[in-house]
């Protein structure tokens, strides 16, 4: 059956912040709103090349539980600000029309972020097309849900190109669900960038890229990681094991801690980990490997068994509903004119 | 709110068989399979013009309850035959690739026939695109769900044109929910035609037409009426009242009938109605009007109140599920090569 | 297939306001909030008997388009007030626990009002059950979606009785979609009553009744008409035809009106209709019948053909989403303690 | 928000086959149908006690991809056989009526197995209740979807008890989604048992148990594992690492293998693993721990961070659709009388 193999045909982008350890001296600033943070990275051509990413602006919003009502309201304000700032950074004008594109497969919950967001976007282009007057408050907005290659048989980029040819928008906004390469980012991070959507590397690269370079108009991409693979879960956990041992070791004589059941000892803010020798003691040969080598080994172990699954938290239905509500509300508000 | 006004932006086609009373000597043949019937009409240019329709082949399948399992199986066979016959009539070859388009709004149940059908279409084009060998059994098939202008801001035809430019299919199949102009056809009729989709008349006509004339490649349209307006319900009922009185009059001395409660007297097969004088007696001024004049009057009465609603049977969810399952299975089978 | 026959097994209540023409001197008062109105009727035993209804309080909220954002906000406030007033009228105390029941079939859109409302009710009883402290702001609330007899094989009332035996709530709130007996009430009326849910008449009456009499605890029923049958559409229209002719006659010499296209002449506020003679002239024998006789005739005409469908407006998906959001928000707020 | 904490309130059962390593000499037999296997375990009181399980019959069906059409058809036949055999084993008679219960939360995809299965169960009890004759082919069948405590505020068992009191079925069939304690079982195993549903251990045990002991009538439980926790993924992977190293070591001089890319070397059928010394070399301190100790450590590491997520494969929507279709078809067929 074709349904089960969709992942093969899907573009997968990931978060810039997971690649920054390899470069230095890039522009970076933070805005903090209580427990929500926007981190903005400006990547120039040279540094982008080193980590196989695109030159441009990357804004990453970090937040906690989106299903909490208070959190949601605050996060909405922050997201509106981030979108507006990005629109300003790339000089989008009030008269610029936008085509908003919801990537992903509506029928696979963790992949439905784009289509569900589009469902609640306020579109206005039809008013102009029907020859009616458009309220000054509104920009010309259209939207499309192109589907995924596994269910249309057509490359997403081809559909988008075809529609752009007819609609001729000034710029694009593309919404997509991403794969996280860290357990702690899943459903808790929004990435906005003016660099578009493009796979990190590999053969299919240029063919699928949705960006200013390939389409000839500005492309803002908004992504939220909603899935993670088993390799990531395991390699993350190995690192947590090292941090856990480091924390336990440091607190070995802390009498107060001994009264706390082990399972409740929160080492979340413990930012030290084991040194090379200690790692080897705890994890033998594995402890001697670098992070990338550990990932490669786990991939090697899980893939032949067919167990390197892309997984998503059990509660994904509620979370996706809230995340798409957040994005559509944020877009509706930040695209209004004042 | 934009959601509620969608109907304004939707193309509405209706059934050819509801317009034939005004023309003569057209080609017509019937195939009967138990209680399922295919009626084929071939309309030439001149006759088509008289009733403001397009020249071409119209196949209408009449059936009863699609939610009955046995009926479904039989209807599936008949629908496959009708599609294959139509493909042959217009000389579709095995090497011809097809783009199947599901019109309508997925979020409005009676309008979701097209999108739901597409959800279960077996597509194959991605295999060819990925450079893999395609089983000889399969034609090159792609599909798209363009959405409706009320939610995309883009005319459906523009999206289709844009996608055709990229995909370059040999022919199109377009699925859409229709408005019935008779209570007895709703959810009980499939119309297949090689004339495409186009509104019956009016200003917006050419702008929206999806046909060989406007797109340059064969377009097969498959439609099922799933909604009806209040005017139709009322004007139909007035005609049933006339037939009912005619039946009662004819059977006035039938003693056996008197034992049957009025509500169970089935005049379904009574094909006579009242004459002009009798109609006037039963319905006064209204009885004196022609069918078209009655429709116009009812529209005049209901429209200013906002009560000329498009309605759908309460059970539409079950029916649409079955009808879309029927169409996707019929298409998957009839597009296979042998 | 069983799915299609569900309506047979469903309790159908209707609006009290459609039965008041036959009684006099009942208590009635109105509250008007812009274009939203609450009409409260207090029916005593004797008057209730005349119209085959139950003694008690009936609050009917009249409103326009619930899908309009501003309307929604206002209507929400009005609905909260109406629920609170009704709770006060029957002396519900802060310490009283409530079981909220969503009647109807989740899989049939116009019948899904109850289940969808329950989906967003804030329940609290599990907190108490798990032995945790309940915030003073909250009442003890539980909820259940019993399904319909056509899909469970169990009478709804039996399920409710079984659950009440275990949960032992102080009172019930029951949400249900109703059948309207007027085109103008559909999706535009909320009825609240302390008389519970019970069919208007007939054999099955006591067996299905969900009320204080049959269950032994207060039952508040909240209903919104979402379907209407073809007989209602036709008999309503015949009355509109009479009003239309009356309006046209009265304005026969109004020169200004002649410039307005007939279809735009809004006689909505014209509250006169034709007299007996005029009715007969316009509608012959039919015009000579009383409203009830006309309804009976139409039922007689449509039923044998199978065309006396329960129908719902095409846009029902959007409307039900909004109506259930309204009810759940109104219930969550009005059940809070202060 | 309450939605996100549902897992707390859910009964979680797991697969018997994951607990057998600790007992000996139990009755066990296998039936093999191509690549589908039924494993039947009969557990007596003593052996059941050792592994904290219930005495009774456990049938486990092992299969591969349920979304493959051919597999589905075969698996359906096998499942029908297994259900019929279990009904026979506990002496269910043709005259016995059944109440089928779909546990779980319809709004959380991996937890919706029970409700979705119930949606397509053919129920017949309403025919008898309405006083109509029931076809000899059919047993008296009713069904209910009780919801979960997180959304009803009521313990599932209480709802079931209440309904049983009214409906008085001869036996129960309970459908539920389970948590797997192995990556390889997820969505690939059906467990049938006459021991009902009950958490493996702990305080809440008796309170929630749905079984012959607690309800007084036979309870057949049908479960499919659809979620897995992060601890399981990691501890499974550590074992795969050991097997992988064992395989690599054994094949160190296998020249043919060297031509195969590491990621394609399928050690699936390699059933050896490392010895204690080797484990320690590869994994240091961790390698020295028993399986249970490793699990405990990982739980200790992940829980304080909030990362011990219950996860489900990204494609869960398609899989759940197919699995629930399988169960409802299998139940409909195996409950028919002949």
Image (spheres, coloured by chain):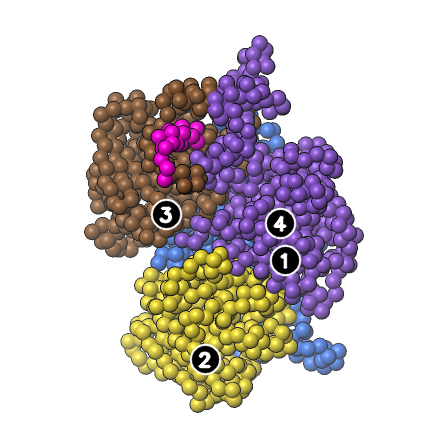
Chain colours: A purple, B yellow, C blue, D brown
What residue sits right under mark 4 in the picture? Answer: A197
Give whichever of discs 4 and 1 has the lower sequence position: 1
Left/right placement of residue B309 relative to residue C205 reads right
Q: Residue at x 68, y 77 (%)?
A: C261
Q: Are marks 2 and 3 on the same chain?
A: no
For mark 4, name the chain. Answer: A
Q: Are marks 4 and 1 in contact (CB under 8 Å)?
A: no
Magenta segment boundaries in residue numbering: D235-256
Q: Measure how far apart labels 4 and 3 are at the Cα level.
A: 33 Å
Q: Residue at x 35, y 39 (%)?
A: D189
Circle 4 or circle 3, nearest the eye: 4
Q: Residues within 10 Å of mark 4 (few under 14, many from 20)?
A: many
Main SS category, magenta section: helix
Q: Are marks 4 and 3 in contact (CB under 8 Å)?
A: no
Q: Measure how far apart labels 4 and 1 are at the Cα level.
A: 17 Å
Element at badge 1?
strand
Residue C196 lies, in percent from the top left, at: 49, 47
What residue sits right under mark 3 in the picture? Answer: D66
Element at badge 4?
loop
Circle 2 or circle 4, nearest the eye: 4
For mark 2, name the chain. Answer: B
Where on the picture, by quarter, is residue A200? top right
- Residue A216 is covered by the magenta coloring: no
- Residue D249 is covered by the magenta coloring: yes
Q: Measure how far apart labels 2 and 3 are at the Cα level.
A: 42 Å
Q: Residue at x 31, y 80 (%)?
A: B254
What residue sits right under mark 2 in the picture? Answer: B57
């Amino acid at each position: 059956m074709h349904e089960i193999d969709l992942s093969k045909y899907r573009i997968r982008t990931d978060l810039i912040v997971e690649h920054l350890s390899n470069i230095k001296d890039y522009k970076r600033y933070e805005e903090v709103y209580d427990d929500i943070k926007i981190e903005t990275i400006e990547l120039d051509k040279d540094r982008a090349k080193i980590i196989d990413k695109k030159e441009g602006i990357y804004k990453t919003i970090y937040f906690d539980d989106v299903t909490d009502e208070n959190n949601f309201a605050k996060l909405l304000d922050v997201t509106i600000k981030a979108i507006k700032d990005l629109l300003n950074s790339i000089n989008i004008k009030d008269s610029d029309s936008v085509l908003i594109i919801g990537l992903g497969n509506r029928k696979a919950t963790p992949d439905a972020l784009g289509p569900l967001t589009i469902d609640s976007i306020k579109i206005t282009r039809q008013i102009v097309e029907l020859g009616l007057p458009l309220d000054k408050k509104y920009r010309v907005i259209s939207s499309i849900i192109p589907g995924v290659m596994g269910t249309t048989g057509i490359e997403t980029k081809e559909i988008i190109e075809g529609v752009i040819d007819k609609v001729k928008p000034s710029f694009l906004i593309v919404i997509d669900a991403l794969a996280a390469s860290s357990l702690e980012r899943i459903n808790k991070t929004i990435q906005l960038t003016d660099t578009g959507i493009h796979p990190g590397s590999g053969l299919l690269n240029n063919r699928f890229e949705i960006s200013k370079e390939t389409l000839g108009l500005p492309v803002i991409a908004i992504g939220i990681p909603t899935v993670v693979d088993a390799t990531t879960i395991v390699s993350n956990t190995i690192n947590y094991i090292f941090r856990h041992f480091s924390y336990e070791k440091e607190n070995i004589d802390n009498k107060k801690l001994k009264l706390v059941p082990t399972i409740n000892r929160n080492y979340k803010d413990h930012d030290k980990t084991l040194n090379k020798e200690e790692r080897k003691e705890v994890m033998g040969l594995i402890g001697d490997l670098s992070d990338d080598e550990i990932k490669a080994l786990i991939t090697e172990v899980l893939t032949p068994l067919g167990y390197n699954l892309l997984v998503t938290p059990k509660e994904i239905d509620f979370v996706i509903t809230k995340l798409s509500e957040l994005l559509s509300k944020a877009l509706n508000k930040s695209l209004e004119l004042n």
